[in-house]
Image (cartoon, rainbow, N blue to C red):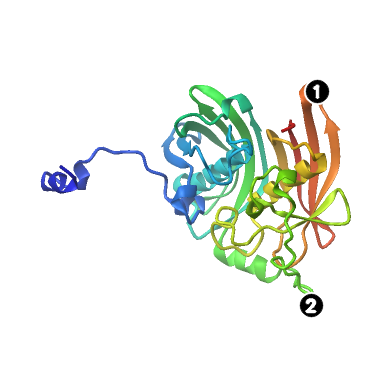
Amino acid sequence: MGLHSTHDEGGLSTLPRLTTTVPKEYVHRACVAEVFLTGCTGQEDQRFSLTGQWPRAHTLFNRSDGRGHDPLQVAETFRQAGMFLAHAELGVPLTHQFVMWNLSYTTYQQHLGIALSPTDFELDARCAEITWRRGMAASLRLELAIVRDGVLAAHGAGTFSTVPPAVYQRLRTNRKPAPDDAFDLTTSRVPLDPAVVGRTSPADVVLTATDSPTRWLLTPDLTHPILFDHAGDHLPGMVLLEGGRQAACAALAPQGLIPSSATTEFVRYAELDRPCWMDVVRVSPESGGMTTVQVAAHQDGETVFTSTITGPAC
């Protein structure tokens, strides 16, 4: 009969509550399709039960073989959970910025396969080590676990701070000025062969070759619809994570690496107007066919990011 007859009987309020995403603004996304969380229920002791869904065919967060969800989708889901809980449950206004200090995740690849329907999951979150300021969380540590069909699919933790607009503006205004010969990220972009970095599309490649076999220039496409979903004045943390994964794959070429677990530290902002170098520091074979790769990003001679990535070859 359509919505008109339902409206006559009481309007849209009579319709049953169905699945929706959480507000995109709460996870700092511009596109609703990039919101992976669908709901939240509060528990005791700053614990929360969230629900979410991953699409079967995400344009970025699928493994290159198309058979599984990319582990970095777990990292992005954890990032969204932190922002959502800060805004929705811990009093942080939508105008505040976030500084992610560290993020770790461990995934279980056998539980990240892509099935015949989208992947619904539950996400258990515990907010720990909260520093309160004026009734809102100024910093906290999150402990997270993703459960799919009753089985643990991933777990991890992250620490971040929330920054009021005036403080953020002051931080960014006082940043080190760009040199006279300012770096142009767009014209410096000569992406590597996607197969070398575990990708299928040149648009998803964020690295450009240098004279060193263990160093690459971080040159993401600034118009990328997912990595740059919304405007910003520095390179997003997810771009650094993607750059680290791609550097690990490039170091192991012609084999690649599935980044099934990673421990990452974010030291400082990565600026858009100067070169950011992605360096592979160490490659260590592990038992069971696993490999660990240590990656660091440097800018202006200073470390901006370090990540230790472990996974099987692909």
Nearer-the-camera pick, 161 or 310: 310
In the picture, measured across the screen, residue 215 lies left or right of residue 130, that is: right
Q: Amino acid at mark 1?
A: Ser
Residue at 73 percent of width and 36 percent of height: 257
In the picture, measured across the screen, residue 168 lies left or right of residue 116, that is: right
In the picture, measured across the screen, residue 27 lies left or right of residue 13, that is: right
Please provide percent x and percent y for residue 177. Answer: 75, 72
Nearer-the-camera pick, 66 or 230: 66
- Rounded to the nearest whole Å, what is the CA distance between mark 1 and mark 2? 49 Å
Nearer-the-camera pick, 285 or 140: 285
Nearer-the-camera pick, 118 or 268: 118
In which quadrant will I find the N terminus?
Answer: top left
Q: Which residue is mark 1?
A: 287
Which secondary structure, mark 2?
A: loop
Please provide percent x and percent y for residue 206. Answer: 70, 54
Residue at 52 percent of width and 27 percent of height: 147
Furthest residue toward right: 212
Question: Earlier along the polypeptide chain: callout 1 or callout 2?
Answer: 2
Name the mark on residue 180. Answer: 2
Furthest residue toward bottom: 180
Q: Amino acid at mark 2?
A: Asp
Task: Specify the quadrant of the image occupied by residue 75.
Answer: top right
